[in-house]
Image (cartoon, coloured by chain):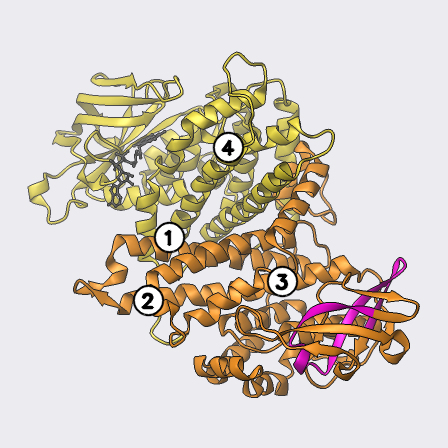
Amino acid sequence: MIEFQCSELSIEERQLQADVREFLAAELPRGSFMPGLGMNAAKDPVFSAKLGERGWLGMALPTEYGGHERSAVDRFIVTEELLRWGAPVGHHWVADRQSGPVIAKFATEAQKRRFLPGICRGELSFCIGMSEPASGSDLASVTTRAIHDGDSWVLDGRKIWTTGADRNDWIVVLCRTSLLDEVTDKRQGLSQLIVDLRSPGVTASPIPFIDGTADFCEVTFDGVVVPGELVLGEIGSGWTQNMSELAYERGGADRWLSTYLVAEELLRNHEHGEISDDLADLLGEAVANYWLLHQLSLSVARSIDRGGAPAVESALAKEMGTRFEQDVLNAVLAFVDQAPNTATDSLFERLLITATLTAPSFTIRGGTNEILRSVAAKGLRPSSGRR
Amino acid sequence: MSDTAEPDTLVVETVERLLADVCTPASVERAESVGWSAAVWDALANAGFPWVSVPVDAGGSGGTLTDAAAILRCVGRHAAPVPVAETGVLAGWLLAGAGIALPAGPATVVPDASAITLVDGRLTGRATVAWGRRAERIVALVANGSDWIVASCRPEQLSITLGQSLAGEPRDRVWFDVPLVATEHAPALPGTDGDALHHRGAFTRVVMTAGALSAIAQMTIDYTNERQQFGRPVATFQAVQQHLVTVAQCAVRVEMAADLATRAIARGAVGIEIAAARLIADAAIVAGTRAAHQAHGAMGVTREYPLHQLSRRLWAWRHEYGSATTWRRRLGRDVHAGGADALFPLITGWVAHDSVRP
Ligand SMILES: Cc1cc2nc3c(=O)[nH]c(=O)nc-3n(C[C@H](O)[C@H](O)[C@H](O)COP(=O)(O)OP(=O)(O)OC[C@H]3O[C@@H](n4cnc5c(N)ncnc54)[C@H](O)[C@@H]3O)c2cc1C
């Protein structure tokens, strides 16, 4: 059955939280930078390197590869603070959240030595190469193909919606290494390759995003030669490895903090003077939900620390969290009398514009809410007895 | 972790087993028509469960508030038609704090401390009191200037008109017009004021809601896996699965909220937890009962199937100890008073007693 357990932060965990708060207040004082919205925040390798120096990247990875063997909860605390501050996490985000952990789990010794130290220092950036033009929710239907050729694999195909592919260093590509008619189930015969985005034959073309930015790309692989030593894990185990990656991707604070700063700025703008009933209602409802979602994410992290595999819990939490990100934004929008305008100095207004335009993506990226509900539904099993 | 207070599993298992035995849907239905269930009350009272969290030397059963919360969850889960919350966690708490003897049987409480006033030595006012007709003592917390007094009244000192909640549970109108000296009374324990009672009452409702909603979630999963249409269990339809996920989420949310509220109350330092939990519970009741009923079809709206025993209780409890609007507005005003920089620390539960550099 589904299990969420309530817990509190220990004194040491509180101290870590206080340290991150102190660091951010000194490093990125409010007003000194344009905060980003959650994981969409800016890419800033210098900032990522500073986090690396502090030991706040690759926190749960083994020390022998540059990690810190801290808990999933410690990592949760750090990322939660970074996100709510709007810190520029873009450069290291995917590497720290997901590529690092899968490499630590499935990669060869040589691959770990090659990639993990750079990830922990905040140097290496990674992309997620899952979706394809014809394979979104039905991910196992991917057709990007790698053919064995001597010591190498030759990769052909197309990935799409690949965040950061035009600027990042590496991409983990989910591809087919056995033909579909050689397997009984389309989830078989899939593998993951770690591909250098600067390899000959790789082209990343930015796709204009709804807010006018261009963060995600279409990536084509045209006869790209991938050395055999860059196969991640087992040939043919790509699906299982990929699914474990999604569990890392789903349960965190990034799934409910995307519009947090909009709410915080609304409050800041109304800090002085009387508060209307409407605003009190908005703040009360928002805080109750943030308080709860924080606890649900904390519970997922604790479960990972106990060795659990909270896939269903992560799916449930992400589904609730992303809907809430939209709900809180809509509540704030309903409060705004003046149409947001780009010719503004107001941080609130600028955040509001980006949030409004990008909000529909919250419930799509990382697996749509419909798919998450299907995942969760599988965990809802009938009891045999009566109530 | 700074606080891992877990309930006594033996207590929880025993209560669960007792209620599974005696608190059947049929007995809940019968209790509704006669206003009482001696079988359920006796089963719990014989083992002292209604008085858990009230110290032994004050006439209670001892144990922690965490234990009491776990018992109240069982009460919610089984729709137990008895005043467990009222007898121990509410009235028992007030009486024990004031050093007044607890009655041997059920006790209840005036939920709103502003309902009864003390003027010229007389307690007057009107209140809606849970199980007023069955209580051996009706306990009121009354303001006396800036102090608070606990007054324990025998039912025959008051005038009682019978009423029922949406769930068919006794919620009686009680008129006070009694000299204070005719009641057993004493100053309340310092810190026990109207607001503390309001929080504690809301806490009992959140915890019972957690129990009832988790029971509803399981009941809905079970029913939809048994019920067949178009040649297959309705639970295999994606549209129905969406309802199941909604109910499960509602249950998960209110259970987490109840756990957090319990910790806050048990440690005696309540911040936003009760208000926040109350809001989470309210939304969960609305969305959860809607999805559960929808997934049950017509079966869910008959008195012959037990869903209504739970859903009607939830609809009743959401109005007790303050509406969601009142709690929401109050929480919002507190948030506003703290300011934007304090917002995230508030959300992540910054507790003043933690010895961490701010
Ligand atoms: C901002 C953003 C960044 C992204 N970044 C990356 C990235 O870096 N790397 C990457 O690989 N991908 C990325 N994605 C892609 C993302 O993973 C996919 O968009 C997602 O998996 C859904 O696929 P789709 O968009 O093709 O939608 P579709 O699968 O075409 O779905 C369309 C609609 O049908 C519904 N649907 C589909 N199948 C079912 C079903 N079985 N049951 C019920 N409903 C169903 C969906 O829920 C949705 O509502 C990104 C997406 C966004 C929006």
As drawn, B96 above or below A318: below
Residue indicated by mark 2: B298
Residue for badge 1: A312
Q: Residue at x 58, y 14 (%)?
A: A345
Q: Residue at x 48, y 33 (%)?
A: A258
Confirm if mark 4 falls within 8 A of ligand 1: no
Q: Colour of chain A?
A: yellow
Q: Find residue A135 and report its horizontal and vertical position in percent.
A: 21, 35
Q: Are marks 4 and 1 on the same chain?
A: yes
Q: Chain of mark 4?
A: A
Chain part drawn in magenta: B124-151
Q: Which chain is orange?
A: B
Q: Amino acid at mark 2?
A: Ala
Q: Do the residues marked 4 and 2 share a common chain?
A: no
Tell which subunit mark 1 falls on.
Answer: A
Q: Residues within 10 Å of mark 2 (few under 14, many from 20)?
A: few
Say which residue label 3 marks: B320
Task: Provide the secondary structure element on which disc 2 rests.
Answer: helix
Label 4: few (<14), some (14–19) or many (≥20) C-alpha neighbours in 10 Å = many
Chain where mark 2 sits: B
Residue lying farthest to the right in this orientation: B120
* Same chain assignment for discs 3 and 1: no
Mark 4 → mark 1, Cα distance in angstroms:
24 Å
Front-most of B139 and A27?
B139
Position of A330 with respect to B109 (left or right) is left
Say if residue B285 shows up in the picture: yes
Which secondary structure lies at badge 4?
Answer: loop
In space, the residues marked 2 and 1 are separated at their CA atoms by 30 Å
Of the residues tagged 4 and 1, which is closer to the observer?
4
Mark 3 vs mark 2: which is more N-terminal? 2
Q: Are marks 3 and 1 in contact (CB under 8 Å)?
A: no
Query: Closer to us: mark 3 or mark 2?
Result: 2
